Image (tube, grey):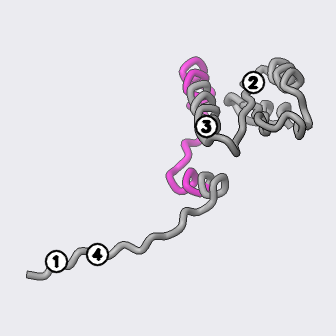
């Protein structure tokens, strides 16, 4: 799957290992994950999404930094890419994290 993504997308990829806090439930050991990441020249991070959302945030921040560096060093690749619009990005975020619950806000009463 990593090979397919790297072939189609001219951007960095991150390989995340979950269950960092539950060593008995791992399906892949840390060394195998790091070795695979090295093999495909992608980022690797092991985290525990259950323990801390901060680890997830840091992993995605590192991916964003790598994407910015990639864009800086390979500007011609990104010049050909269609720039995503706000609707596309919103759909992507909703697909990843789901919709947030709607909060009804009352409009202020503005009559004199």
- In the rendered image, the vertical position of residue 30 relative to residue 111, given as above or below: above
| SS at badge 1 | loop
For label 4, the residue is 107
Identify which residue, 24 or 84, lies in the foreground. 24
- Give percent across and percent down for residue 43: 72, 25
> Which residue: 86% across, 24% down?
36
Q: Residue furthest bottom?
A: 111
Residue 81: give its label.
Answer: 3
- Magenta segment boundaries in residue numbering: 67-91
**Residue pointed to by mark 1:** 110
Distance of label 2 from label 3 (alpha carbons): 21 Å
**Mark whose residue sits in front, 4 or 2:** 4
Element at label 4: loop
- Residue shown at the point (23%, 74%) measured from the top left: 108
Q: Quadrant of residue 35?
A: top right
Quarter of the figure with the N terminus? top right
Return the disc, 2 or 1, that comes first in the chain's sequence: 2
> Comparing marks 3 and 1, which lies closer to the viewer?
1
Mark 2 lies on a secondary structure that is loop
Q: CA distance from mark 3 to mark 1?
A: 47 Å
Comparing labels 4 and 3, the label whose residue is closer to the camera:
4
Choose between 75 and 1: the one closer to the eye: 1
């Amino acid at each position: 799957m990593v090979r397919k993504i790297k072939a189609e997308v001219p951007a960095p990829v991150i390989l995340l290992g979950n269950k960092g806090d539950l060593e008995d439930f791992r399906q892949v050991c840390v060394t195998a994950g790091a070795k695979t990441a090295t093999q495909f020249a992608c980022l690797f991070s092991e985290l525990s999404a259950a323990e801390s959302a901060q680890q997830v945030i840091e992993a995605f921040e590192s991916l964003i930094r790598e994407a910015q560096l990639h864009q800086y060093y390979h500007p011609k690749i990104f010049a050909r890419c269609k720039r995503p619009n706000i609707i596309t990005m919103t759909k992507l975020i909703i697909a990843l994290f789901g919709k947030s619950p709607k909060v009804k806000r009352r409009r202020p009463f503005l009559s004199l």
